[in-house]
Amino acid sequence: MTNKLSRRDFLKLASLGAATSAVLTGCGPASRYVTREPYTKMPEYNYNGQSTYFATTCRECAAGCGLVVRTMQGRALKAEGNKHNPVNLGKTCARGQATLHGMYNPDRVQSPLKQARGNNPTDTDWDTAISIVAEALNNPADTAFLMGLAPDHLFDLVTDLCKAIGAPAPIRYGALGMFEARATLGEASRAVFARPDMLFFDIANADTVISFGANFLETWVSPVAYTRGYSQMRRGPGGKRGRLIQIEPRLSQTAAKADEWLPGAPGSEGLVAVALGKLYAEKKFGSAPTAFEAADINLAAEASGIPLEKLEHLADLLAEAEHPLVIPGGATLAQENGLETAKAILTLNALLDNPGKPGGVYFTPANPLSNKYQRAATANEMAEFIGKMNSGAIKTLFVHGVNPVFELPKSLGFEAALAKVGQVISFATFPDETAMLADYILPDHHGLESWGYQRVVTGTGQSMVSGAQPSVAPFYNTRATADVLLAAATKAGGKAAAALPFKDEVEFIQDKVSVLVGAEGGFYNAADLPAFWALFQQFGGWWKNDSSLGVPPQTANAISKELKVSAAKPEGEGEFHLFVYPSPILAEAGANKPWLQETPDPTTTVMWNSWIEINPVTAEELGVEDDDVVTVESAFGVVEVTVYKYPAIRPDVVAIPFGQGHTAYGRYAENRGVNPANLFGTTTNGAGDLAFAGMKVKIQKTGKKRPLSRLESKLGVYGIGMSEEH
Amino acid sequence: MANPKIPEFKADWKEGEEGRWGMAIDMDLCTGCQACVAACSMENNVPFVGEEMSGYGRQMAWLRVERLWEGEYPEVKMTPFQPVMCQQCGSAPCEPVCPVFATVHSQVEQLNLQVYNRCVGTRYCANNCPYVVRVFNWADYDRPEPLPNQFNPDVTVRRRGVMEKCTFCIQRIHKAEDQAKSEGREVVDGEVAPACAQACPADAIVFGRMDDPESRVSKLSKDGRAVHLLEELGTNPRVAYLKGGSNGNLG
């Protein structure tokens, strides 16, 4: 435990402990699940009318926020933030709150299915399922695993398994990884700071932040942690309120909170970054270093549409600031020149001399379980994987924690390639698009019914692993994927069985976390595994008390390297730039939760559907009104979507949120809205990430109308319905 | 039985009274993320109504995050996000109009109560609420099995024809008060938080005792930035909004 516990903290800890440790200490395999019992025969740990709380990890995204789930009589009632978890310190986002709507959703996969790619699906049983998996493990060279960004314990298990049997290493993908262009940021970090890492941006201690389209208050990397950082920045030391300037083509929820929003043209961000560097260096030091010497300020102003005076003003703000910080967002890097832009923005941070200092850029702490940063696969890596599927080299494909048919751009042709794979086995909890096309669906438990851990990549300076445990017994005839694989490995025998000599998932996780028993500097310490395991569950993970952020190397090197930045060349033809952003409420996997569907979008207040944001002046030129349906056409696809006249978007840009447009995934998601990923092309940037923000599209009226449900009153917004007499 | 005293069932409010429980919302910190909206709905068994009904403005959420636009591109700005829930007025316009005393003022908690089993659905209260924060169950909304497993047993599930609204999570207040009473003490500041304040990632929503001058919420409510919605109506709301912030204070 920490040395600095106040009495009140101690009481809080003790009460949480009383609730959880009663169940969890000395927990043998037989009592690994809390059972759902009738009211007359309640679980022994229940006091009548009292709730029991379980600390676990949120699975709605991969950030690793800690949850405390309130349960009563074996039912989960509410997900709340875990006060101890350093990522979220007791807070949650809307998606975390709605996670129970995923678990108690009426459309879950309830038992193992022989899906037969949708042709007459029939029930199957777990013994048959395990035999099928075991058979695939016996042919390792033809087997591939495609996994999501969470949970990490299963990824580790599959990695160990593949290594032992000689199968190719599992590949990870997630739409948020694509939207955040994580590989590009990592590559730029390698070029500028000599380490390909996920970075930590210390927004909390900065006093002037310029964000190049980083939507860190919405979905970006670790939104709850960065929202806390934002909140602290606004209440800076001595009451000094930090500033935020957002540069992006449309006013996002994050930009709405900025002191100033500058609608820079898509693809011009790199030019703006080097121009700012040059202006700043000239003001501050009299001359610009090599990296920024060649910057063309007039070109930057012209290409971005941000007036010269504004650029100079921003450079003044940076020069005045004590702790300036610039952040590269996902869409900014998802351009054909994205890697150069990312390097320019990181080099600008080096010029501002903030790396490794409060309010600056840091390397994320080394994880206690693995020091390797495992990012999502890039578009290029996925294309290569799809090529392998097409060649028929993959006989069995396992899919877990990701819905590639929906999340991957259609242009990559995943769905067609799926037909070339001999056997597709999905471990989906939900009948999503990919699961519908599988031969077997062997449903995993929902995240709140599962064991596990998640390595925290960023959001906190404390090195940590967030732990997961079931808060309720599995509701349906589902089985932990880890248990299925362990049973199959035993059945397959040989190397697989030898590599995974574990009775069940819990034993595997205990084996992995046992390296932390007796580790120095932890939030708690325990002498042996059973004691450690009880505390690991009670507090929902393990973390160090002190921050261990890495300090990037000396900045002089970075700013003396020449930067080559030009404006990005857009892909395709058409009048408009397409700007696709992950819906702040739904993100990539929220559409199946009815309350998230009915939660208004923060900027447009639209519920339950998709829309296209068009500048009111552009809309007038096109002759379209609110609720008119238009077709949006790129070289790769067409979608039909309803118009929302958005007052704060560049006239040459149209924006569509990503998250809707499912053809499966349960009654609340199905046949609702459109999937803008169907419009994406195939151009990638220097790091292999998709240049999805560099697309041009054509827009055409259809003459159809489809009203959007929105919370805002149309009357007060555009004067619709207001006649002269009023 | 000459001249029996007819109870008024409305606030015994005097000018300048603070009330017992209050909230302060910092609009400079609120990021409009809707975590409060989701948390409230999960805590209070609020139903979802579907696309069509929500299009008619029948969404049931007990709080909404408001924002307006000002100006035209490129000089366009969004007003700061503003979560609006029942303001728990000390002198509430909804109370005197209820013909069946379903909308009453509690003497103990000093909150506006909604007594669901008295409500006959005249909707006079919603009509008279200047903040438009009362929501009406126009139908029995479908929550297919097994979604009802999630129901919070501390909160009544309402049905068709009943008005409802934010309660400041009165079930949590009662729990904290019971706990404090059993330990022979007063509720301490920060001990109880409604679902919205508990979830808020930006720590924009602060809840606590208004009758304790040292509490965080009391101090924030007396801050120079604090305003009350439609103050001129004299409703004496218990929610203070801290204005200022995001827009237009650059350099």
Image (spheres, grey):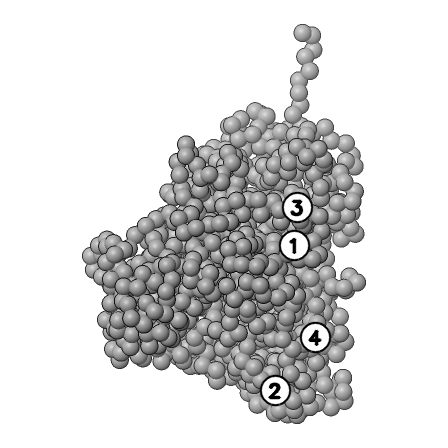
Which is more toward the observer, B85 or B199? B199
Disc 2 with disc 3 on a shared chain? yes
Question: Badge 4 is on which residue?
Answer: A357
Judging by the rendered image, the residue that carries numbered circle 1 is B203
Q: Nearer the viewer, mark 2 or mark 4?
A: 4
Counting residues from the start of the chain, the first of labels 2 and 4 encountered is 2
Q: Are marks 2 and 1 on the same chain?
A: no
Distance between the alpha carbons at the discs numbered 2 and 3: 61 Å
Q: Amino acid at mark 1?
A: Asp
Nearer to us of marks 4 and 3 is 3
- SS type, badge 2: helix
What residue is shown at x 72% (from left), y 35% (from top)?
B185
Q: Chain of mark 1?
A: B
Q: Chain of mark 4?
A: A
User: Which residue is tagged 3?
Assistant: A11
Along the line of sight, the residue nearer the viewer: A16 or A233: A16
Q: Quadrant of the N terminus of chain A?
A: bottom right
Q: Hey, which quadrant is residue A153 in on the image?
A: bottom left
* Residue at position x 48%, y 84% in the image: A686
